[in-house]
Amino acid sequence: MNKILLFVKDFELGTKISSACIDSGYSIEFSDENTDPNLFKNNTLLVFVDLDEKVFSSVGLVSELKRRDLKVVGIMKKIKNQERSKLQSAGCDIIFPKASIIKNIPKLLNEFFPTNNI
């Protein structure tokens, strides 16, 4: 089964994202700042990163994930243009406001991976 990584510490947000992804047929793995990128499985396709968390809001994390050919979806409470530009340059594919990420997950997954539909 294809896997999605979550770099999310907010329990409620993580639960909502994981439920939406599982409902779409993906498995979920929670990661943190101590996760070794060398342990990411080959079937990992996508990463959600809570960019409001200081430990995850680094350009280094985003670029490391992108270097591993993963799709990177950033999540922020309020998207600032300067931050968006910096993170997209580092490899963040798209940045969503937290208020709209849950309802957009099925569409987002379908756009990134149209052949993985259930």
Image (cartoon, rainbow, N blue to C red):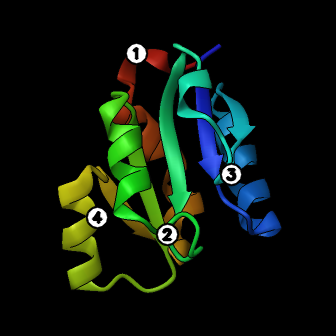
Q: Position of residue 54 (x, y in %)?
A: 56, 75
On the rendered image, what quadrant is the N terminus found in? Answer: top right
The amino acid type of the residue labelled 3 equals Asp
Neighbour class for label 2 at 10 Å: few (<14), some, many (≥20)?
many
Of callouts 4 and 2, the N-terminal one:
2
Q: Secondary structure at mark 1?
A: helix
The amino acid type of the residue labelled 2 equals Leu
Q: Distance from label 2 to label 3 (Cα)?
A: 13 Å
Identify the residue position indicated by label 2 in the image: 51
Q: Distance from label 1 to label 2 (Cα)?
A: 28 Å
**On the rendered structure, is 76 left or right of 87?**
right
Identify the residue position indicated by label 1 in the image: 115
Q: Position of residue 46 (x, y in %)?
A: 48, 35
The amino acid type of the residue labelled 1 equals Thr
- Of the pair 22 and 56, the residue shown nearer to us: 56
Q: Distance from label 3 to label 4 (Cα)?
A: 18 Å
Tell me: residue 79, above or below residue 37. below
**On the rendered structure, is 84 left or right of 9?**
left
Q: Determine whether label 4 and label 2 are within 8 Å by CB.
A: yes
Q: Determine whether label 2 and label 3 are within 8 Å by CB.
A: no
